[in-house]
Image (cartoon, rainbow, N blue to C red):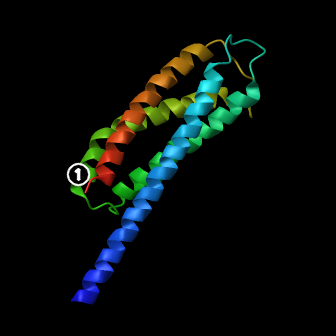
Amino acid sequence: MGKQRKMSSETSTERRSGTQDMINKLLAERQEMLLMFEKVAGLQPYDKNVDGDALQKFCGVLVDYSAFGHFEIYERINDGRERRKRVVDMARDVYPLIVESSEVAVEFNDKYDSADHALDLNHLDRDLGKLGEEIATRIEMEDRIIEALVAN
């Protein structure tokens, strides 16, 4: 019986470590995205002199951040790998708002990732404002899930 309890404890410790690693990666992705967002938002006035490379890099970081949250956290919950009811319930509550923010991020990327089309910056300020609001909501929702993940 003692050996089984030790194995169970080791498995639990490994899961907690994996959860913490996932949270740390999410927070690092978020920080990188926020720094790039700040850089792109500071490119005003939006005219022909805008740094297209910075905008394109931001689009890549934004998509990576959005995808990480979805594939690493929410897929884990949807696949049943997360067994804590509090985490599952929290994810179910906030997931629709995170999906909405991801859709806005994809739309922004499609419009401003200049790898396959010319940039039209006429609405960049408006689009950054909308994206910023969605990012703020997403961060709030992610923080709620993180709190549930780290709670004992």
Left or right placement of residue 109 versus residue 70 in this view: right
Residue 41: image quadrant is top right
Label 1: element kind? helix
Query: For the residue carrying disc 1, how many other residues have a C-alpha within 10 Å: few (<14), some (14-19), or many (20+)?
Result: some
Q: What residue is drawn where x is 57% and y is 36%? A: 33
Q: What residue is drawn where x is 67% and y is 13%? A: 44
Q: Amino acid at mark 1?
A: Arg
Q: What residue is drawn where x is 62% and y is 17%? A: 124
Residue 78 location in percent, x, y?
35, 55
Residue 7 location in percent, x, y?
32, 82
Left or right placement of residue 40 versus residue 15 in this view: right
Q: What residue is drawn where x is 32% and y is 53%? A: 150
Task: State whether residue 1 is above or below residue 146.
Answer: below
Q: In this view of the protein, can residue 117 be seen by the observer? A: no
Say which quadrant the N terminus sits in. bottom left
Task: State whether residue 47 is above or below residue 30.
Answer: above
Pointer 1 residue? 86
Residue 48: image quadrant is top right
Left or right placement of residue 37 versus residue 86 in this view: right
Residue 13 location in percent, x, y?
36, 69
Residue 38: image quadrant is top right
